[in-house]
Image (cartoon, helix red, strand yellow):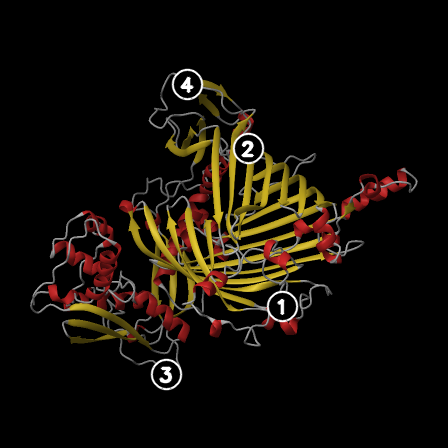
Amino acid sequence: MKKPTYPSTSGLPHQRLLWLMVCLFLTACSNTRYLQENQSLLVDTDVEVTGPVASSEKNDLKNDLSSRSLQLQQPNRKFLGSRLKVWLYNQKNYEKKSNWFWNLMLSERNLEAPVIYDSVKTKESVQRMVAYLNNQGYFYATIQTRQSESGRKASVTYDVNTGKNFIVRKITYDIPDSAIAKVVKDGERLSLLKTDVPYKASDLSSERERLTRLIRDAGYYKFNRDLVIFTVDTLNKSLFVDPLNPFEVMPNVIRADEKPTLDVEVAVVPPEDSASDQTKLFFLNKIIVYPDMALQESPDDTAFNTTETRNFTIKYHQNIVRPRVLARAIQLRPNERYSTSNYSNTINRLYDLNLWQFVSLQYKDAKDTVQKLDAYIQLSPRKKQEFSTNFDVTTSNDYAVGSAISVGYRHFNLNRAANELHITVKGGIELRNQNRVGLSMQAQEYGVNADYVLPRFALPFRVRQNYKSTAKTRISAGYNNLRRIDKFNIRTVTGALGYEWNESIYKRWNVKPFNLNYVGVTLTPEFRDTVVKENPYLQRSFEPAFIGGEAVVYTFSNDDIFHKKQNTYFRAALEESGAWLEGVNSLLNVITNKRDNLETAANVKISRFVRLDLDYRHFWNYNRSSVATRAYLGLGLPYGQSDVLPYVRQFTSGGPNSIRAWRLRTLGPGSYRDTSYTATIFPDQTGDMRFEGNVEYRFNILRLFGGTMMLKGATFLDFGNIWMLKTDTSRPGAAFKLMNIYQDLAIGTGAGVRLDFSYFVIRLDWGIPLKKPYPTQNSKGWYLGEWTLGEGRWRRDNIIWNVAIGYPF
C-alpha cells in the first residue's frame, strides 16, 4: 500500500491546521497497515463471569479480572473513537515526522506502541486470573478463552466460571508466648478475620500486618511479621486429589445446596534463634531532640548547644522553640515501652505545628543496655514567614468579567511558641457589558481578616485530650465591604473564638462558642424606594443586624492512600444566632430598669436564626478517570422576633461552583423568575433553603510541556434550586412545597477542560440548561427541545461560561 504524504506544518495557516486535525482522526484507524505478516492488532478484550454469586460481586470480579496486573494484554486506549496515541507512535517510528509541530505532538507521553496479540500472554493471563480467584476463595474456578480475528484485528473473551467460594467456619490461635498471646487476645475484637464470611487470601495478609503492628505497639520493637503464620484447613480433606497443592484440582463432590467451609489457624511461632530479640520487650532510654538540624548535618556535630529537660535532651544551634512546645508534641517518655502509636502520634503532632519542613524519628539500640532504645528526633525548620496570592476569574453572557485577588501573610512561630498569625487582604470587582458604552463597574468587594492560632486548647480549665488528636485555638477578626453600584453597601465586622481538633485521622471538629458579626447596611435612595420598599422580604433582609451565637462544624474525609479506589467527604455545619445576645439584652434591661438594651442602644436588630449546612461528596477513582458526586442541603430558620435570615446568611444558587448552567444569584427561588429590568442589572435571588446535586465525570486527555501539566476534560450534570420556607407574595412560586419539588428543580449539563499543574487547577466550564424551573414552551420546563445551537444569539443567551481556580467540589 502506498504511504500517504503529508504537507509541511511549518507556518500552518488555519485551514491547513484544520485539515491536519481532520486527517489525524481519519487516519488513526489505519494502524494495522504497519503490522508485520502474521501479526494482529489486539482491539478488544472482555470478561464474562458466571457462577453462583451475586450480580454485584460478578461486576466486582469482572473489574478486578480486567486489571492490567492480571490481563497481560489489553487494547490500546481510544480517544474520540480512535487510537490516537498509536497513530502518533507510527508517525514517529515509521513516517519519521520531524518539525516544530510534530516535535510538540510526538513527545513520549503521547505515544503508545500498538498491542500485538500474543496467545502465550493470553495463557499466562488465564493462570494469573485463576490464581487470583483462588486467593478470593473460588477454588473451583475455571476459565476458557475465545479468540476471533478479522481484518488483522484480534479480540479475546475470557469465560470465567467461579464455582462456589469457601466460607470461614472457625478461627483458632496457637501462640506459645503467653505475653504475646494476651496482646493478641486483647485486640481480637479488631481482627480482620471473621467467621461465616467468604475466604480471601488478602484478609490473611492484612491480618498479618495488623497483628505485626499490634505486637510491635505493645513494646516488641524487633518483632518480625514472618513469625505470624496461617494454616488453612478444609473440613473434608478427601475433596483434594493432590495434598501438596490442594486447590489445584478438586472433584465436584459437594452437593448443590452445600457451602464448602474451612478453618483458619493463626500461629505466632518463636524465632528459630532462641537468643533473638524478636519476641523481647524494649523500653526507651534517652530521647534527644534536634529542633534546627540541617538536612545533611550529623547528629554528632560538637557545635550543638545542649539543654536538659525532664523527659528529653535538646541539642540546637538557635533557640527557635520553647521546650514546653516540644513537650506537648512529643509523646515519648524515658523508661516507657516502645510503641508504634507513640511514634506515629509524635510525628503527626510535630508536623501539625507547621514549624518544620522535615521530621525524622529514629531508634537505635542503647549502648551497654539490654532491650533499651535511644530515640533521635531530627527536625529541619521551614521558613518562619510566608506570602501567598490567589486569583479567580469568572465570566458569563451578562457581565463581562468577575475577578478577585487575595494576598496572604503567615507567621508560623510567634513568641517561639508555634503560635501562628494569618492575615489575608482581598479585593474583587464585577464589570458589566453595556451596549455601545463598554464596560462599567457592577460590584466591588474588599476586606481584611486576621487569625491568631495557638497550638493547644486555651481554656481557664484543663481539658483531657485524646493522645491521637491535635488541638488548636483560633481567635479571628475581620472587616468586609460589599458594594453593589447604585444599590447598596454592606459592611461586616466579625470576631470569633474557636477550637479545632482531630477526633481521628478522618474526623475533624471546629467549635466556635463565641461568634459575633455586626452587619451595617446602606441603601441608595433609588434602590430603597423602587426595589426594597416594594418587597417586605428584602426590606427586612437589608436591616442592620447583630449576628452573635455559636457554630459547630464536623468534617469527615478519608482521601488517603488506603482509599484510592473510593473516598468520601462529609461536612455538617450548625450555626445559631441570638441566644447569648438575647441574654446580654435581658441583662441590660435589668441594669437600666428596662429603659435601654442592646438593640435600642446600638439601633441594630439582633438576628435570631438557626442555619444547617450538609455537604456530602463521594468519589470513584480509576486509572485515568474519576466520577465525582455531591449532594448539598442548606436550611435557615429564623425564630423569635426575627422572621427573615440576614442577607449575608441567605442562600444563593448558580455559578462556577454550583449549577453551572445559570449565573450566580440568578436561579430561583422555586419556580419564580424575575423578568424586571432591575434583575438584568442586579441579579440577586436568595432563599431560606438550598438543595443541589452534582455528578461529574473527569478524564485525562494529554500531558503537556514534558509532563509538568495535565490537560483534563469533564462532563457534568447539575440540578437543584433555592426556596423560601414561607410564602413571599412578591415572588409567586418561591415557597418550598414537597409536591412541587420536581417542577422546581433546575437541571443543567455541560463540559469543561482543566489545566492541572498538580499544585493548582485552572478550570473552564460551559453549562447549558436541560430543564428550567419556570415555564418554557414545554409546560414541564424541559428545555432540550428548544436548543438552537446553530443560532449565535441563542448561544449567547443560554450558554454560560465559567472560569475558576480549583475543582467545583
Nearer to us of marks 3 and 2 is: 2
Determine which residue is flagged by label 4: 304
Marks 4 and 1, the one that precedes in the sequence: 4
Nearer to us of marks 1 and 2 is: 1
The quadrant of the rendering that contains the N terminus is bottom left
The location of residue 346, given as percent across then percent down, is: 48, 37
**Numbered disc 2: secondary structure:** helix
Determine which residue is flagged by label 2: 328
| Mark 4 to mark 3 CA distance (whole Å) | 75 Å
Nearer to us of marks 4 and 1 is: 1
Marks 3 and 2, the one that precedes in the sequence: 3
Marks 1 and 3, the one that precedes in the sequence: 3
Quarter where residue 338 is shown: top left
State whether residue 457 is above or below residue 693.
above
The location of residue 749, given as percent across then percent down, is: 46, 65
Determine which residue is flagged by label 1: 671
| Residue 256, label in figure | 3
